[in-house]
Image (cartoon, helix red, strand yellow):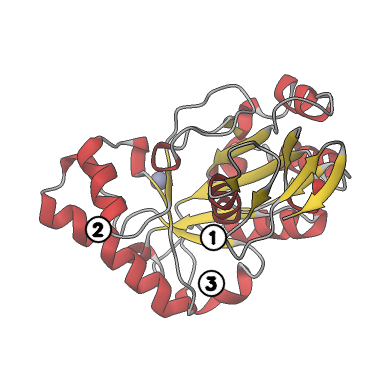
Amino acid sequence: MSFKLLYPEFKTKALTFSYDDGQIFDRRLVEIFNRYGLKATFHLNSGTLDTEGFLRKDELSELFEGHEIACHGVMHEFPTHLSPERLVQEFYQDRLTLETCTGRIIRGCSYAYGEYNDRVVRTLKTLGFAYSRTVESTGRHNVPRDFLRWTPSCHHNDAFGELADSFLNKPDHGKIPLFYVWGHSFEFDREGTWDAMEKFCERMHGQPDVWYTTNIDYVDYMNATCGLLFSADGTRVRNLSSIPVYAEIDGERKIL
Ligand SMILES: [Zn+2]
């Protein structure tokens, strides 16, 4: 049996975005994503919400409808500098507050200042986080090896050129590429790059072979694919998760 894993709706590529810090510029960014049907994750510091320049708690649910809200630490502290107790508080309290504000279950994170070590990773795992993003760009469109040390493709400043071209022009075989772009929305304002971002989103939108996804939906799907059971002779496969898995088996499209 030949088995080729695909993304939901038999898409062959995936695109996701990740934006940190929850400043008011997220409002303009999410409007651009919505206009082009793109999905993103917004990593917020719950302790800065309702202060000048940052989003309000009471706007989060509506503003980010269809997108993911995730943690970034209560007060944007260096995770590696915190005592074990403070480290737990920084991320557990962030989850609690964001979940209370939105009624959602929040399992995503990104490391403030991109700082993490094995102790930080262990703590996040214990607190129920499914993934956390680093700032170590790969310059590639690869599927991550470790979701708690998730290395993105690139910062948005590096996304607009060659990496966009190579993603869109990738042949429809082989690995299932993921284009993961991260940044801060205030950078578009500070650097005058709103137009470049808008052009990029316009270029990326409406591609029939691309799955537009939040970070957590990507993680949940990939975890479901890892749980597939194959018979010893490789002729049969079962999906025990409640998430449908899309594949091409012996050249035929199947939903498992
Ligand atoms: Zn940050």
Q: Is mark 1 within 8 Å of ligand 1?
A: no
Q: Is residue 73 above or below residue 183?
A: below
Q: Which residue is mark 1?
A: 24
Quadrant location, the C terminus = bottom right
Give the Cα distance between marks 1 and 3: 11 Å
In percent of width and height, residue 61 lies at 56, 75
**Which residue is at a point 79% across and 40% down the rendered structure image?**
249
Rounded to the nearest angstrom, the CA distance separating label 2 from label 1 is 22 Å
Q: Using the rendered view, name the quadrant where residue 156 is placed.
A: top right
Question: Between residues 92 and 74, which one lies in front from this camera angle?
Answer: 92
Q: Which mark's residue is nearer the viewer, 3 or 2?
A: 2
* Depicted 136 relative to depicted 109: above or below: above
Whichever of labels 2 and 1 marks the residue nearer the N terminus, that label is: 1
Q: Earlier in the sequence, mark 3 or mark 2?
A: 3
Which of 193/210 is in front?
A: 210
The amino acid type of the residue labelled 1 equals: Ile
Q: What residue appears at the point 53 percent right and 23 percent down from the top-left corner?
A: 138
Residue under the point 52% across and 34% down: 144
Q: Residues within 10 Å of mark 1 (few under 14, many from 20)?
A: some
Q: Is residue 78 visible?
A: no
Q: Which residue is mark 3?
A: 60
Tell me, for residue 208, which label it has, or none.
none
- Disc 3 crowd rating (10 Å Cα; few below 14, some 14-19, many 20+) is some
**Residue marked by disc 2:** 90
Quadrant of res 35: bottom right
Residue 239: x and y, percent?
A: 62, 56
Q: Mark 2 Cα within 10 Å, few/some/many (few <14, many 20+)? A: many
Are the two marked residues, 1 and 3, in contact with CB atoms closer than 8 angstroms?
no
Looking at the picture, which amino acid does disc 3 mark? Answer: Leu
